[in-house]
Image (cartoon, coloured by chain):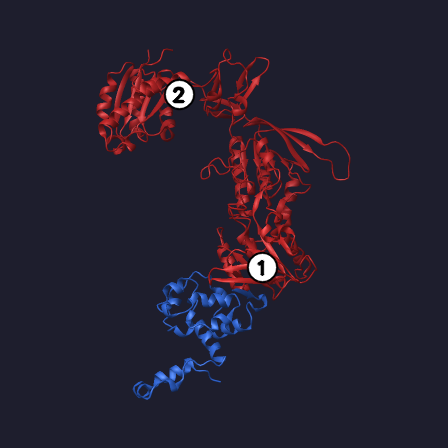
Chain colours: A red, B blue
Amino acid sequence: MERIGVFLCWCGANIASTVDVHQVVEWLRDVNGVAHAENYMYMCSDPGQELIKKAIREKNLTNVVVASCSPRMHEKTFRKAASLEGMNPYMVEIANVREQCSWVHQGDKDAATRKAFNIIMSTISKAKANNPLETIRVPITRRALVVGGGVAGMTAALELAEAGYYTALVERDDTLGGKMRRLSRTFPYHEDASAVIAPKIEELKANDNIKLYLRSDVTEVSGYVGNFQVTIETRPTEGEDGAPEVVTEEVGGIVLATGYDLYPVAAMSEYGGGKVPDVIDGLEFEELLKESLATGAPVKRPSDGKEVESVVFIQCSGSRDPEHHKPYCSRVCCLYTNKQATLLTQQNPGAKALISYMDIRTDCKLTEEYCQGNIEEKGLVYIRGRVSRLYREGDAVRVWTADTLTGEKLEIDADLVVLAMAIEPSVGAEQISKMFRAAVDTNGFLQESHIKLRPVESSTMGVYLAGAAQYPKDITDSVSQALATASKIQSMFASDELHQDPLVALVNPEVCAACGLCVPICPYGAREVDERARFSRVNEALCQGCGACVAICPNKACMLKNDTPMQVLNQIHTFLGKEEPAQ
Amino acid sequence: MQQKIDPAKVRGEEVSQVEEIAGESMYRCYQCGKCSAACPATPEMDMLPSQVIRYLQLGLPEKVLKANTPWICASCLQCMTVCPKGVDLSRIMEGVRMMQLRHGENRIEMREFDEEYRKRAPQIVFISGLRKFQSLS
């Protein structure tokens, strides 16, 4: 026979002003199986927790129900308190009488009091059928994998290697450095981008803890957090024959840093779709600048090699256009465009830079000062309005735009037009997402687990995100995020084993028909049909207890531990004041 | 009407002359519009004070030279007081007026004042009026 203790929290006035907490306790004392019931001003406080511990000790309780706020707030607190008295923490249940009762029924104390009682009764019926559970323990392979050899991937790999962990770095290109290798200078200090990245590349090559896979792709991923198996295929060097080399790495943590590509100019029919000569994208202009800076010769345009005297830069090319192109802001274009215009006036003295913009977004350290300083000193002309179209007119590119600050419709003939094209996930990001079960957002960027609080975690445990693969970002932010992923993996590697909540799915092999419906529905890849034993297994390390398999199982062979269909039905019946169904 | 912008005229001679007279750079202004919001005389103006700078930034001084704004400006300095970049618009207005006067366009004619008024008004009105509104050429 259960001996249940019920602890009703006032939450100051949050619950007590709407629910008659004394009446509820009176009622509870008459309930069969309830060995102890009391209320207190703040159950989560130290004296509140002490009341729970004391009752467990003195009344030999088998279950505890705390009627308080949402389990998201203090479930852990109360489970820990109970476990200190030797009770299995999973014998503690929370009845949410704040968010789901007092807060929403403030005008009706009688009804709220009855509802609070019903919620508690319903939770008691669930608690009665709970089983003690043990934390799942998973071993950890202390080796890491980084996908992508740009500045983000390199930073993460170096950080992990320097911490002493073997790290495999997979890069599909035959060189490291990613997009940074194509850049001329970086904002705001105009450092040579290649000179910034080159020592990092050397450092990385010299580090014994790093295994470098160039010209390589990940082709298969299996396993789970702490225990992944990753198959890597290396293509032979260009000009050489032979089959690709295939290696399998066993790793515990993974960083995805697959970077970005520019949305193609060909997709911008309003800007000539790539067919108008001397209309180029931002990276192509970086290369023109890079050459000019290296040789000292002025910037020349691609079509006829003419030294450029006037350049129109078009920001938000493909960005912030939900109707035709990309809905999001590509974040780095405002600053690199300002930088490019500045370097242009430096390399081609007397050249004019006109910049079409909607607003100038300078959200990083020092960048507002950088941007406004350049405008003042170099006389960069910002024209507030989007370019509607452009076409070839004789020797020039004719640009139609407007200046909304004066209300003038404008026409400009320029030597060269530079499109600050939208940033999109790099080619192949979709396959990466599927292989690593790392979800993507509506724009194809790898999706963080929580935009505020879990910004570097993917939807799969043990797989982390760094750099522009997650969302457009500059070098500073890419490096910060990469360092964060390395820290996350190091903190995982710092423990002997991973601990996981045991509230996972369970299969009754007698009932399971091995139909396999649970395998594709599982978002975590935690289900697999054992063909020999003829039933579907649960990988407890991967299962997050979402219940998708429970809902789809036609035989009701799947259930969640301590949330069985019978427990859920009992809760509903109890809440509605009906008889409990027969077992 | 489509307005042609000539990149060569951006930061061109006339705009540079206004900058020189005013001792102010047009490119310090980032077009926030606070000056126009503060100016007490905008109801009489055909162009906002911020737009005067805007046209000069775009290399379109001819628009500004036709505007009445610089002549309505009373140099009350409300604009400069609120400007986040510390731009002294009254000096830019002065620069534009000087340019306009150099084009030989007079804003006042002594003959337009009747005998009665000329007798009544203090001397300084005509002296400063002529200095401000009369071409020297």
Q: Position of residue A578 (x, y in %)?
A: 30, 16
Residue A330 position, x and y percent, is 53, 47
Q: Nearer the viewer, residue A121 or A146?
A: A121
Q: Which of pointers 1 and 2 indicates the residue nearer the eye?
A: 1
Is A342 located above or below residue A431 in the figure? Answer: below
Q: Secondary structure at mark 2?
A: helix
- Identity of the amino acid at label 2? Tyr
Residue A21 is left or right of residue A253, and the answer is left
Work out which quarter of the rendered image holds the N terminus of chain A and state it: top left
Q: Identify the image quadrant of residue B40.
A: bottom left
Determine which residue is flagged by label 1.
Answer: A399
A360 or A272, nearer to the observer: A272
For the C terminus of chain A, the image quarter is: top left
Asked whether B120 or A528 is in front, the reply is B120
Q: Which residue is mark 2?
A: A90
Image location (x, y in percent) of residue B35: 40, 65
Does residue A234 appear in the picture of this structure? yes
In which chain is the residue bearing label 2?
A: A
Q: Identify the amino acid type marked 1.
A: Val
Distance, label 1 to label 2, CA atoms, is 68 Å
* Callouts 1 and 2 close, C-beta under 8 Å: no
